[in-house]
Image: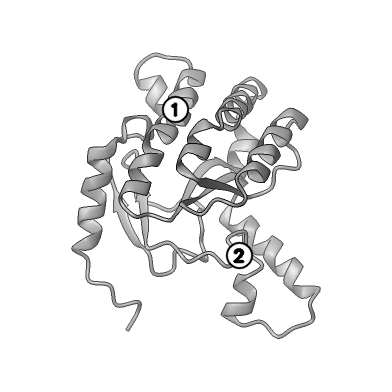
Amino acid sequence: MNRRWARKRALPAAIGHRKGAENLKKLLPAFIARGITHLTVYALSTENLQERSASELKNIFREIERFAQDEEIFHENKIRLQLFGEIVKFPISTKKVLGNLVEHTKNYRELNLNLALGYGGRDEIVRAVNKFAETGQRATEKNFGKFLDSGDQPDPDLLIRTGGKRRISNFLIWQLAYAELYFTEKMWPQFDEAELEKALKWFQEQKRTFGK
């Protein structure tokens, strides 16, 4: 998404990734102001790790580090960072700064920000199945769900998909079962507070039945 935004403006992909990260930090207080307590952002997929060039991945990891090293907004707004996905193959420096931010914000609860990095919905379920199998229990939705990356967090109420695409793209496959899906033509670097307000207004107008 960030790369497409940059390409449309004849800019390097690295600029798009930077703009995307900057926009997330800019919008964090807006989410808090609207009473949102859990936010999951799809930052880097398992497919991205396999298909992007080494040079682009290097730029992405640099932006992740830049994002995580700038801790001021997390402390000012009492934002807790958690990670979804697998970062074992990330550069050591990237893993270190992410780990530091997770540790430094672990006691905050104003907003739980989940960054999905090296994340794929199918991969998450496979990892959860393998962990759950070790318990020897009979699976239920409740006890199995605790082994997902989201653990005991509530399922999302709303998915906002930017960039004009109308699919979930292997994101939170289990957790999105009854979420409302909002699609906007705006790409993520363009997504602003006004568009957030528009999405939330649309959500409030939906009649939710949860399959009943």
- Residue identified by numbered label 2: 151
Q: Position of residue 209 (x, y in %)?
A: 29, 77
> Which numbered disc covers residue 76?
none
Does 106 sit left or right of 134 as displayed? left
Q: Position of residue 27 (x, y in %)?
A: 37, 37
**Residue at left 59%, top 32%?**
68
Inspect this view and state whether residue 165 appears. no
How far is mark 2 from mark 1, CA to CA?
Answer: 28 Å
Question: Relative to the observer, which residue lies in front, 188 or 120?
Answer: 188
* The N terminus, quarter of image: top left
* The C terminus, quarter of image: bottom left
Does 164 sit left or right of 137 as displayed? left
Q: Three-letter amino acid code at disc 2?
A: Gly
**Residue at left 64%, top 20%?**
55
Considering the numbered disc 1 on the image, is that residue within a helix, a strand or a loop?
helix
Q: Note whether 139 is above or below 203 in the view shown.
A: below
Question: Relative to the observer, which residue lies in front, 35 or 95?
Answer: 35
**Residue at left 60%, top 71%?**
145
Q: Residues within 10 Å of mark 1 (few under 14, many from 20)?
A: some
Question: Relative to the observer, which residue lies in front, 76 or 115?
Answer: 76
- Residue identified by numbered label 1: 22
**Residue at left 29%, top 35%?**
192
User: Considering only order in the chain, which callout, 1 or 2, is on the residue closer to the N terminus?
Assistant: 1
Q: Three-letter amino acid code at disc 1?
A: Glu
Q: Note whether 31 is above or below 123 in the view shown.
A: above
